[in-house]
Image: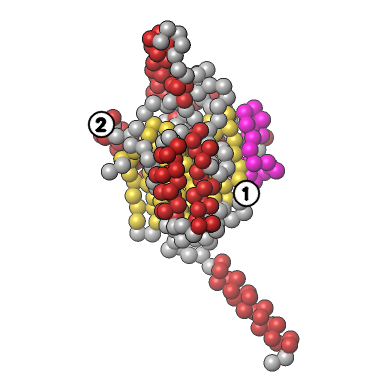
Amino acid sequence: MSKKLYFLCLFLLAGYMGLAQSKPDYNKITLVIHGGAGTITRANMTPEKEKAYKEKLNEALKTGYAILEKGGSSLDAVEATVRVMEDSPLFNAGKGAVFTNEGKNEMDAAIMDGKTLNAGAIASVTTIRNPISTARAVMEQSEHVMMIGNGAEKFAKEKGQVIVDPSYFHTETRFNQLQQIKDKEKTQLNHNGGTGSTENIFIEGQKFGTVGAVALDAYGNLAAATSTGGMTNKRYGRVGDVPIIGAGTYADNNTCAVSATGHGEYFIRSVVAHDIASLMDYKGLSLKKAADEVVMKKLVERGGEGGVIAVDKDGNVAMPFNSAGMYRGYMKKGKSEVAIYKD
């Protein structure tokens, strides 16, 4: 064989291998979602409310999975999935965002591309209808990773994102939750002679409401997206783990995609999402073992409550949580599940 023919064969073989690698595999496509974790039990859930949550979780799953089935990207799938939950008053994100101590609705969101490790995040916004879409715009249409407050809102407007009046986010259920917590604070202050603890400032009450989605598409690309309204009665411009890449949101094609929900301060300190990926990368742990190690052991030892959803490069799913419940679900070929309680 001549040298020219030899290199031609190598070239053709390389091309064939490239085509083989880029051929979509629809057997592995997977979508996993969560709608918050915390004190979610059958005792404090009416049948009507449980039905409403399950219907909306199923709607979110079907929306994102339909994109994956048509060969769409994991990024498109997680964004669309999260938008469904942002538009629902059932979840603490977008339309259902909780109130700060000042009586405002402040939202955070983040998205990450496992193929490129590019990421986008926004924090403390009050007029952006779908924060997750603006987070993606930050990733794809700016040179930055995170924008906050007025700057993020100005950017969103310039990029054609849907801007709404802050009153759009006002729901009576969330407003009443704020009043209940403020009443508890007053009672505590009076009981302690005006020297009460500030512990209640960072307690939402019944659940840590955050929504998120992780996905594996037919081309083997992972993505993660998370959106939240933060904690009821939060003060001082507090920002939680959601927009902190590596804490509440992370994706890497080499390992997994993770979206978290819980008491954000603990998730930031423990860099939860990245730690799960690192345990897989450095120690060779499976997705399940890595997620359990972080959520069920490390977080518990540090006093952190909450959970994560995750999917790895092979389509394996993990949804561990150390709280009483977590709104969650997944969909993959031939399998679909939506759950709320621990049992």
Tell me the quarter of the picture where residue 155 sits. top right
Q: Residue 136: give x, y in percent of width and height.
A: 59, 43
Q: Which residue lies furthest to the bottom in this view?
A: 1
Q: Residue 250: give x, y in percent of width and height.
A: 54, 47
The magenta span reads: 137-156
- Tag 1: amino acid: Asn
Which residue is found at the position 63% from the left and 44% from the top? 139
Q: What's the image's color scheme?
A: secondary structure
What residue sits right under mark 2 in the picture? 43
Closest to the observer, 309 or 161: 309
Is residue 105 shown left or right of residue 320?
right
Which residue is found at the position 39% from the left and 26% from the top? 205
How crowded pointer 1 is (Cα within 10 Å; few <14, some 14-19, many 20+) is rated as some
What residue sits right under mark 1 in the picture? 118
Q: Which secondary structure class fits the magenta region best?
A: helix
Mark on residue 45?
Answer: none
Cα separation between marks 1 and 2: 42 Å
Q: Which of marks 1 and 2 is nearer the N terminus?
A: 2
Which residue is found at the position 44% from the left and 57% from the top? 286
Look at the picture and state if 26 lies above or below 40. Answer: below
Q: Residue furthest front?
A: 301
Closest to the observer, 151 or 80: 151
Look at the picture and state if 46 lies above or below 72. Answer: above
Q: Residue 47: give x, y in percent of width and height.
A: 25, 34
Look at the picture and state if 58 lies above or below 150. Answer: below
298 within the magenta span: no
- Tag 2: amino acid: Ala
Q: Residue 26: give x, y in percent of width and height.
A: 45, 62
How crowded pointer 2 is (Cα within 10 Å; few <14, some 14-19, many 20+) is rated as few
Look at the picture and state if 185 lies above or below 239. Answer: above
